[in-house]
Image (spheres, helix red, strand yellow):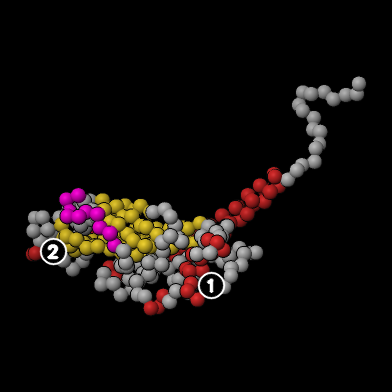
Amino acid sequence: MSTQQNKRLKDVEISFPIVYGTISFWLGKKASEYNSHKWTVYVRSANNEDLSVIVKRVVFQLHPSFQNPTRVVEQPPFELSESGWGEFEIAITLYFHSDVCEKRLDLFHQLKLYPEEEAGPQSTKKPVVVETYDEIVFPEPTEAFFQRVQNHPAANVPRLPPGITLPPPGPMEIVPYEKKRGDTKDHPLSQWFSNFSEADELLKLAAARQQVQAHIAKLRRQLTMIEGMPQHSKAFPVPGQQFGHI
């Protein structure tokens, strides 16, 4: 990657709305004391688009009682399915591609197998679904990352601030997303996914927040430049100090 492509875009943020959670099914007559539910834990895009554009791999840390409790998923869909009888906290770690972010993201989700009392008795047909909506924000992305995801349907990409222009992408930088199906739109469990259409308002708020933060950053830089300029020396009276002629 060239130095120009590594250049970071000041006052710019790219965000990806995500959902992580679990869906668990009671096994009914097939249930045993130590194997009562089948469940799936996952990370998906809030609009079920392909997350592999930013996510390199996801590590799920299960309860130590499971065989090989550390599970690594390196391609979409980023999920794993298991069966058992107990509820526990699952650690979910997202690792990103090198041009996206060097830091990992740690998430935690409580596996829930049994429905709330008001939801009625357990049913083999109606699963227990627990999902959390979140937003991953990448401040000051590189030019290469920006160009790679600016038209991606899973990304919330703002307009570039005035004065910033990008060179046209090279032929290898245009990713044909249609040829790679990594989305969860046709997922077998998609009928149980929560509809986060109400998250549209959150996306609008996030976009507004990006504009405000960009404006604040710009004002801070201007203030820093002003403070760094040589000032004309002026004599200001100090409280309590008397000035007079000799």
Question: Relative to 23, is 172 on the left or the right?
Answer: right
The residue positioned 37% from the left and 62% from the top of the image is: 56
- Callout 1 amino acid: Pro
Residue numbers of the magenta segment: 64-73
**Residue 71 at x, y percent in the picture:** 25, 58
Residue 223 shown in magenta: no
Residue carrying label 2? 27
Q: Residue furthest top?
A: 246
**Rendering coords of residue 228 (x, y %):** 70, 45
Q: How many marks?
A: 2
Say which residue label 1 marks: 169
Q: Is residue 176 visible?
A: yes
* Residue under the image location 41 percent in, 67 percent down: 53
Q: Nearer the viewer, residue 162 or 72?
A: 72
Q: Quadrant of the C terminus?
A: top right
Pointer 2 or 1: first along the chain = 2
**Residue 236 figure quarter:** top right
What separation in Å lies between label 2 and label 1 (alpha carbons)? 52 Å
Res 152 → quadrant: bottom left
